[in-house]
Image: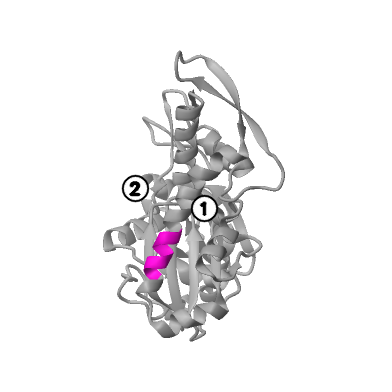
């Protein structure tokens, strides 16, 4: 019986197959026909349909703010992606899904239901920060404190780890999506131009940042003029976006500081040596690592592939799933059996 590790995120879905590594990395979007519920496409193809679908096709993101908001859609999306990764027919894999450390029982059940709808024979849950740390090359068994900041699409999950468990954790809904919203709002107010969220995300990735760049960068943005609704284009410089994206980074910084204040002093002292581990796609935002490092006085470590850290971290447990308890673990209160 083979097994998959899944990072079911707001922005993307990553699948890790036992013995093969990361076998799928796609946007967490699904397009279905409104009447029949038939899946038209998933991943990149479905993302390209956002805001462009005909009346009989609906393109949605079933995970919002780090939470499954539509279990049926999430199950359909996961089922299609597992099939693309080599699971289908009589082969029903075991599935290990990573969840935030402060997950509620209702959210646990939504994840498990989505996994079972996707065709898994058994579903297990694992805490996201532990998986992210393991995927970044940090030993989760170490008694020394490690600070992990996973900046995803819908949420930023912050945790202090020690001996393979989460000691303190916090989650805020300031992450990639909120940065996209900020860029969209800025263009509407400052340039009187309305663009969709996919365009705002592209602008953020191309020229966005929380610190000034050495070279001048700009981009031509096309959209709908607010005044009359007609097509228009404007030129946006990288420096314009720094203040609005810095506000997002400041809120992440404030959440980190608040968490450190409640962490046992011995573990806080360890952080001066272990530093800060940044994972998730949001850690790629220009200057994010340098900004947090400067403000916290901690060395920031960003792995080569921060988006894949959670999925890669599941590899430490996939071979020992029989030792874990199946189903709803309520990980906020019961953490044994993980790693």
* Residue at the spot 55% in from the left edge and 44% down from the top edge: 242
Q: Which mark is residue 158?
A: none
Residue 229 pos. (x, y %): 46, 15
| Residue 207, placed above or below residue 172 | above
Quadrant housing residue 166? bottom left
Dominant secondary-structure state across the stretch colored magenta: helix
Residue picked out by circle 2: 69
Residue situated in front as seen by the camera: 227 or 5: 227
Residue picked out by circle 1: 13
Contact check, label 1 and label 2, Cβ < 8 Å? no
Quadrant housing residue 127? bottom left
- Circle 1 sits in a helix, a strand or a loop, which is it? strand
Q: Residue furthest right?
A: 215
Q: In 3D space, how far apart are the residues under numbered discs 1 and 2 (Cα atoms)?
A: 15 Å
Residue situated in front as seen by the camera: 67 or 268: 268
Q: Earlier in the sequence, mark 1 or mark 2?
A: 1
């Amino acid at each position: 019986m083979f097994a998959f590790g899944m990072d079911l995120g707001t922005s993307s879905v990553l699948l890790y197959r036992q013995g093969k590594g990361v076998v799928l990395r796609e946007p967490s979007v699904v397009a279905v026909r409104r009447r029949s519920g038939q899946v038209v496409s998933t991943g990149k193809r479905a993302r390209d349909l956002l805001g462009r679908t005909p009346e009989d096709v609906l393109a949605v993101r079933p995970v919002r703010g780090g939470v499954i908001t539509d279990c049926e859609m999430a199950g359909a999306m996961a089922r299609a992606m597992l099939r693309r990764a080599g699971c289908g027919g009589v082969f029903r894999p075991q599935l290990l899904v990573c969840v935030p450390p402060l997950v509620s029982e209702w959210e646990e059940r939504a994840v498990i239901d989505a996994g079972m709808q996707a065709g898994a024979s058994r579903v297990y849950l694992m805490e996201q920060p532990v998986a992210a740390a393991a995927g970044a090359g940090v030993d989760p068994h170490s008694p020394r404190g490690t600070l992990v900041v996973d900046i995803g699409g819908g949420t930023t999950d912050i945790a202090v780890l020690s001996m393979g468990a989460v000691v303190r954790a916090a989650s805020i809904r300031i992450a990639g999506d909120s940065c996209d919203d900020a860029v969209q709002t800025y263009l509407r107010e400052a340039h009187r131009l309305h663009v969709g969220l996919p365009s705002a995300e592209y602008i953020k990735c191309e020229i966005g940042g929380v610190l000034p760049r050495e070279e001048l960068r700009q981009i031509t943005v096309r959209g709908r003029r607010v005044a009359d609704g007609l097509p228009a284009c404007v030129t946006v410089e990288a420096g314009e976006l720094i203040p609005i994206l810095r506000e997002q980074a400041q809120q992440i910084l404030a959440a980190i500081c608040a968490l450190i204040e409640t962490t046992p002093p011995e573990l806080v002292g360890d952080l001066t040596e272990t530093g800060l581990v940044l994972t998730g796609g949001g850690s790629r935002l220009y200057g994010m690592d340098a900004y947090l490092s400067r403000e916290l006085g901690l060395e920031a470590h960003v792995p080569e592939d921060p988006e894949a850290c959670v999925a890669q971290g599941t590899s430490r447990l996939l071979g020992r799933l029989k030792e874990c308890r199946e189903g709803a673990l309520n990980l906020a209160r019961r953490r044994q059996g993980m790693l």
